[in-house]
Each structure stands twice: as structure tokens, then as C-alpha cells.
Amino acid sequence: MNHFLLGIPGNIGVPVISALIGAVALWPLRRRLGTVGYALCMLPVGLLAWAIVPLLTTLTGTVMRWRVVLPGLLGYTLLVGVTGHALDRDNAPSGTSHVAAPGLAAVATVLLTAGCAWLIYVTGWSIYTVDSWSNYAMYGISIADTGAFTASMMANRALLLPALHAGVAFLGGTWTFVLYPLFAIETAALLGYAVWSTAFAGFRAWVRVCASLLTVALMITTAPFLLHSVYVHSHMVSAMYLLLAVASIWRAFESGTARIAWLTMAGIAAAGLALARPDGFAYAFVVYGVFALVWLTDESERTAAELAAMFAPPTAGAVMVMGVLVSRYGLYQAPERLGAIAAIAVAAAGPSFALLLWLLHRCLRRTRGLSPARLTLTLAALSTVALGASFLIDPERFVQAGSTWLLNLFAMGGWNRFWWFGVAVLVAALVQGSRITRAKWALPVEYAVFQFLALAVLIHGVTHPGRYGWGDSLNRVTFHVVPLLFWLAADLTASLFRRTRADEPER
Amino acid sequence: MTATLLVFGVIVLLIDISHAEDARTGNTWDEPERWWTFQGLESPGDDFTAVIPTLADVTSRYSMHIGLSVGMAAREVAGGARPQRVLYPRSLDTMLVPGRWNNGEYAPALAQFDALTGYGSAEVDYDPIVDTATVEKWATEATVLEYPWNVRAVLGSRPSGIVVLYYDPTERIVYVVPQALSPVAAGMSPPQEDSEK
């Protein structure tokens, strides 16, 4: 421990190193992603590098030392960089940005990350519960001390956050807190980008700026967002990766030449989502569902490379984690948590889903693309069947979990009146139907929100009945869709503007 | 209808801004003893030791809090890193620290200081009780740092790989001491140290 890097505190060192790793790893894809896209992907992509380190130390039986940490971080950087280069050899620009813009963006993003991290560090602010100190903090210190990432750590808290806490501990800090507000800043920036470039695309620049700022301002002033910005737990990081994954899928299918590059980002974000929480492997299916919805309904030619870009990163992540754990601890069991066999089964369902999509594509290739509405209904029907099946496992527990959840959302869960807004947005999205010219992206975002909620209820409905108060797991997990809800609200507002011609689009 | 719903939603959010700073505002369920209780926004910085006094005041966790404090003190004695060994007496229940508000007494929890010190703790047969003279000797010959929950770290002239726990029953204070300053060091036979992998 105490491997200080130039005297920089670990809480600042880890995010800055992560941003640097992201900048270097994504350099081959910089022109495909565009300047803003490249800058926004740097931190989320770089953070995942730290997940490699505990796997290496566990596999080799060594403690955390620079001689293990450095190869781990560099190996990840090289892996993402080489894959990006191989996927996109000509790296033609997807936008019209200046040739020096990505370089400047990389420097600016690293400096901005360092500046924000320093400001957060100076405040020293955090909120914590027993999960934070007895799991995340202690696991991080323990990994930094002993190098061992254990099966119980995986079952309780998954890999990503213990690995990041271990990185901070390795660099001399014993309490990790700066990363959490940085996740929040990244999430807010991603939402602003999504609103700017999807919902309000085609409007005058000042309208786009105002709409993006207003949407972000509304989100960051809600009680749950503020809480999770400083709460040492898995929720803000999960919300960040979910938003990045859905936004990346959108960029992939809007950008023409940069499809593979953006699908790789979606895949990496899905890996982040899968490794951020013990139930993350299941939530990655929301991303897979959105991909399926867009991929199968897209009218352009579908390729195997697109499937590989989307599914390879989360599959590789799962194989590495479970491979190391099973080789070290065997087929471990975890009472009331995901044991090795269950985790492998859920993780293996990802590539199986990819195979199913490929077979579907082969069957449907003459049709060019399915009806989005019909496919959404099919996926929704499948979710309903799954929910019904989980209800039958233990109806009493399921009803109790559901009623506790609803009571928490509207009265006891610390949301204030947020879910009145949430319901208004969801109802508006459902009822608008054909009355308003729907933006192409309303449907997948709506689907992502509903699918996530259905999965969360399914997982919690069969595991525990819940508890009253903000700390209920299902209540906290529900936060992950909050940025998507604001994106949807902005999309609906833009649709209204278009319909009423309150603002004349430029195109 | 869509416009009405959106305007309604935004108005609701705007009303909420006035008390957005506290997620518990909307929580009418007051359960201070539950695991998810938090004290509110704290500013402990990056030092776990500063976190310990701000942990939620839950009686059933007092032993864990004391264990955390012992663990952080042991790291300090070892020079800010994990010690090779933390030696503790056969019964930790002899080391009782007063609780915060219910007059109870609590012993340090092994699981917490063991985890914080790299799982190298070892149970040893020795008398952990120290007298006032020894405590005064530590105060004059070494640096004694205060930790939360009546825990003190006694720092030697050099970081110590082996750390021993002692207890002052008069003041009800747990002392975390380097082996070199341990009163019974000569008579103790700690288990063989593991060489670092």
C-alpha cells in the first residue's frame, strides 16, 4: 500500500489514470466517435481497466504492486486500442471536426477530470451506509493488501467497484469517494449530449443548448440524483453505464460509418453495467434488448461484426471474471446470492442471445427489417411472461415486493415527488402513440425503461420481499433508469415542439 | 394530453427542488436502527479513520466500529500499511469500550480489524491488561495517537510489522502497540510470519 503516484492522492489518481487510459485506448477510434463522443467515452472506458488488476493478482497469487498493476492497466489499454484499430482500420471521421480536435479533447478531458476530482477531493463529501464501509471500502483495502479478489466479494458486490476502491487504496487513500460525484458528472454530460443530439437534433442551436441544459438541470436537482451523486454505492455508476450503452446504440445506428465503433462502446458499457453490481449480468440484458430492437428493425444491412462488437466486451468480461474465480475457488456457492453456476448461466445467456439474434437475422434477412412496434410488443410480451413465471414461484413474496416498491416510490423511498413526474412521462410516452410524429428513438428508450423495471421487479420479486424506506434494494436500483426517463421526457417535448411548430427545424 | 402530463411532471420536479438536498425528506418511515441509516452528508475526506466517528449510531454495530478503529490504529503503527501480524488475547471480551448512549460496553470485533490488516491477526496467550505506569511510559517514550471509540495507537521510532493489543481497564481504552514497546514481548511467541507472496 501507499504506492503514491507523484504524491497525488489515490482519490484523484484513479480517475485521472482512468481518463488517460480511456484517451489512449480509444485513440484509434477517435475520429469515428467524433470529438464529443470520444471525450465522453474516455472515463467510463478507462475505469474498467482497474477491473483487470484484481483478476491478475488473484490469478498469480501476488499482492498489488506496480509490477502487476502497470501490466494490468497497460494490457487493458492495448486490448481496447488494438481491437478498436482492427475494427476500424481507416478510422475515417464521422463528423466535420478539425483533425487536431480529438487530441485537444483528450487533453481537455483529462485536465477537466483532474480539476473536478480535485474540487470534489477538497470538499471531502460523501454519504455512506454499512454497505459502503463494510463492503466496498473494506474489500478495496483488502484487495490492495492481499491481492485476493474472493468469491464472496463477487457474490456480494461484483468486481468493478471493489477494484476501483482497491486502486484508490493502492495509491494511498483509505476512503474512496471522489469517483462517485465524477460518475454523476459523467452521467449528466451524457444526458446533455443525448438530448442535444437526439431529441432536439435539427432544432436551432440555442434551442438545443437550452433544452439540454434544462433537462440536465432538472435531473441534477432531484433528491435521488443528489443522493446517489455522493452515496458510496453501485447506483450512479450503473445509471451511467446504462445511459452510455443506450446512447451508444443510438449513435451506432445514426452515424452510418461509425456503427462498429459505437457498438463497441455500447458493448464496453454493457460490460461496465454487468460488472458494477452482482445482479449486473441480468441488467445487461436491457442493453441487449435495446440492441435487438434497433438491429432487427434497422433497414440497412446487418453484419456479424456488429453482433461481435456489441456482445464481445461483456462476454469477455464475464469469461475473465468467472474464469479466474472458478479456477481459484472452484464452483463456489453463495447463499441468497449468485453462486458460480448461476452467474455462469446468466453470463452465458448473453452470447446465447447473440446467437439467437443471428439466427433470427438469417430467417428474416429478406424482410430487411421488422416492424419496431411489433418487435417491441414481442419483447414486452416475453418480459410479461417472465414476470408471470416469477410471480408463480412465490406469489406472496412477489406481491409484497411489488407493493413495498410502489409505496417506496411514492411515499417512503426518499424520492419526494419524482415518480409523479416519472409516471407522467411514461404515460405520455404510451398514450401519444400515432398522434405525434414519433422520433425514431422514443421507442427504444421507452423499451429500455420498461424492460429495466420489469427485470428489477423480477429479480427482487423472487429474492426478497423488500423493506420500507429509501434503503430498499429495489427502490435504489430503480434509480438506474432516471437518466433515461429525462431523455424520454426531452424526446416527448421535442416531439411536441415539432408538432406544434413552436420552433421551425433548420433542416 | 402529452403536453399536460409533461407540464405537470416538470412542475412537480420544480416544487421538489426546494428540499432536494435531503433524500430522507420524503421518507416518513423513521428506522434509525436499520442498516441503511446514514447520518447525512459528511466530509471525512479520504481517511477511513475520519469516517469511523461519523458512522450511523446503531447499537448492534458498535463492536464493528471499535474493530475498524483498532484496524486503522494497527495500520498506523505499521507505518500506514498492513502489519504482518496483529496479536490479540484469547478473549477480546476483556477489552470493553463504552457505547455511545446506552451505557453498554462493547469489545472490538475481530472480523473488522482482521480484514483491515490483511487477515494476518493471530490469537496469542498473554495478559492484555496494562497498568497506569506502562501507559505513562508510552506517553513519555512514544507518540500516542487518539482514535475513535477509546482506541489509541502507540507509535514506536520505526514502523512495526508486529502489533499487539493491550487494554487499560481503568480508562477503558484499547492500546495498539508495536511489538518493540510491548510489555510482554519477550515472553510472547507469535505464530510464524508468512513471507509476502
Image (cartoon, rainbow, N blue to C red):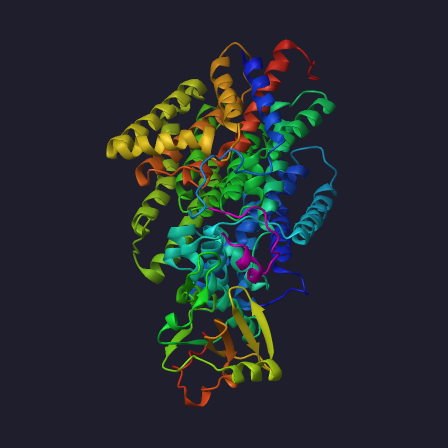
Is the residue A437 above or below the residue A215 in the image?
above
Which segment is the magenta one?
B37-56
What residue is shown at x 41% (from left), y 29% (from top)? Answer: A406
Task: Describe residue A497's horizontal placement relative to residue B66 as left or right.
Answer: right
Furthest residue in direction left, as rendered: A393
In the rendered image, residue A5, in percent from the top left (x then y), is placed at 64, 64
Residue B100: x, y in percent? 49, 58
* Residue A20 vs residue A413, the one in the foreground: A413
On the rendered image, what quadrant is the C terminus of chain A found in? top right
Confirm whether the magenta stretch covers residue A488: no
Is residue A294 positioned above or below A329 on the image?
Answer: above
Q: Main secondary structure of the magenta part?
A: loop
Question: Which quadrant would the N terminus of chain A be assigned to in this image?
Answer: bottom right
Task: Decide if residue A36 is in sight here.
Answer: yes
Q: For this rendering, which residue is in front, A201 or A242?
A: A242
* Res A75 visible: no
Examine the rendered structure and indicate whether residue A47 appears above or below residue A242: below
State the image coordinates of residue A352 (x, y, percent, origin top left): 35, 39
